Image (tube, helix red, strand yellow):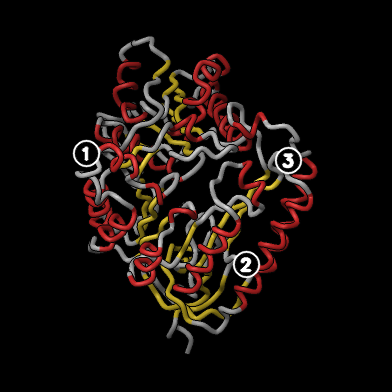
Amino acid sequence: MRQTPSKENSLKKVHFVSLGCPKNLVDSEMMAGSLLQNGYQVVDQPQDADTVIVNTCGFIEDSKKESISKILEMADLKKSGNVQKLVVAGCLTQRYKDDLVEGFPEADLFVGSGEFQNIAQILKKNELGDLQKKYFNLPTYLQEQNTPRVNSQPRHRAYLKISEGCMKRCAFCAIPLIRGNLQSRNIQNIVHEAKLLAAGGVKELLVISHDFTDFGWDLRRKNPTENKQENPVNLLRALTKVDGIEWIRVLYLYPDGISPEMIQLIKTEKKLVKYFDMPLQHINNQMLKSMNRKMTREEIEMILKNIRAEIPDAVIRTQFIVGFPGETESQFEELLQFVADQKFDRVGAFQYSPEESTPGGKMPNQVDAKIKEQRFEALMSIQQEISRQKHLRFVGQTIEVLVEGVSEETELLLQGRSSQQAPDIDGVVYINDGQAKPGDLVQVTITDSHDYDLVGHIEGSIQ
């Protein structure tokens, strides 16, 4: 998100701190797009900026602490004179509104998740002496076809946000309180953006939403006849027809919406990577009911069985919550055994964080923090060994890898990802021999493996 400086915008340098999920990152990219269109310059370092925008996350306690810490850090920069203006935006701002305004007098502007698209106008008003400090409207803003956006990811990949809000009401989750109910873009709108991204060199689309399988439900409900084609399977079909896109990765699929038709499409379409990001949260039926997950263990196991029967090499990534209110030792042991039996390719875990105004936060029998930590470590220890064994099987195989560039670990290595690895949340493939440019798809022979990463050389590079 860079722009060459000019005399006209030399006093309008903006730096972004984007926290939380990729959906929040896309919001930052839309703000950057709007600012660039209006004569601002986006810079990489906060000390080089006149204005710093902290796009906060307010999802769980750790996210809120990180956001507050970053606001304070940028406030110190402002006090030192390196930054003139501090803007606090995003989910934490939307969720706590007046409390945040009162708690951070150092900040000049507070912009909610339904007003960020107007950031250029808000900054200009402030520069002209407008004293308004708070900008809150609807819970969220649904991206339009002409919404400007600058891709902040490496040129060969981009996130594609297809909806806002969520229609689910999981007992642990504050997202509907922050972002509101489900609002889907239409397929034509989404495909238009995908084509623009492809024209800019994007090869991998990462399709994001709060729940991909609910896409279009709100549109179909509003106008069943006109919008009957607005559904997840048709969206995927349309995206596979976009020229230039090589990989399409779908993130966050609620298990009850993974239909046989969707599985068959992912099985047969080359561009759709065989990667199911399917947060399960728990497996004990009582826990699932308490979490308001609307599925049983038996139904979840059937979905897993169907995926593996049709796509034996499918990667299944999931997440679990440990220490949800009322979770007994036996219920947790059931979860541990389930993870050991299923041997998921990727597992993430969270220690339950009580969130105010959510059903879970009001429940009795909250689990002690030490017990939550012990359960987290026990679950991840089991998964670490599973991951190690799965990675060992790759040694000697040749796999397709999308090259990201020089390794973050050392300049002596290249770094890439196979289709089984999503950026930022999964491991990587280190390339210790061969030459390639970022965005190249190359064949890599795996020679070594670690718990979460693989090592290999580009095929043909070893004499």
Q: Secondary structure at mark 3?
A: loop
Is residue 90 positioned above or below 232 on the image? above
**Tag 3 and tag 1, C-beta contact below 8 Å:** no
What residue sits right under mark 2 in the picture? 342
Q: Residue at x 59, y 32 (%)?
A: 64
Q: Which residue is more in the foreground, 85 or 330?
A: 330
The percent position of residue 239, horizontal first and vertical second, equals 28, 58
Q: Farthest residue toward the left?
A: 226
The percent position of residue 124, horizontal first and vertical second, equals 30, 20
Q: Residue 146, labelled with which disc?
A: 1
* Real-space CA distance between mark 2 and mark 3, rounded to the nearest whole angstrom: 24 Å
Amino acid carrying label 3: it is: Gly
- Quadrant where the N terminus is found in the figure: top left
Amino acid carrying label 1: it is: Asn
Left or right of 355 on screen, residue 316: left
Q: Mark 1 packing: few (<14 Cα in 10 Å), some, or many (20+)?
A: few
**Tag 2 and tag 3, C-beta contact below 8 Å:** no
What residue sits right under mark 3 in the picture? 326
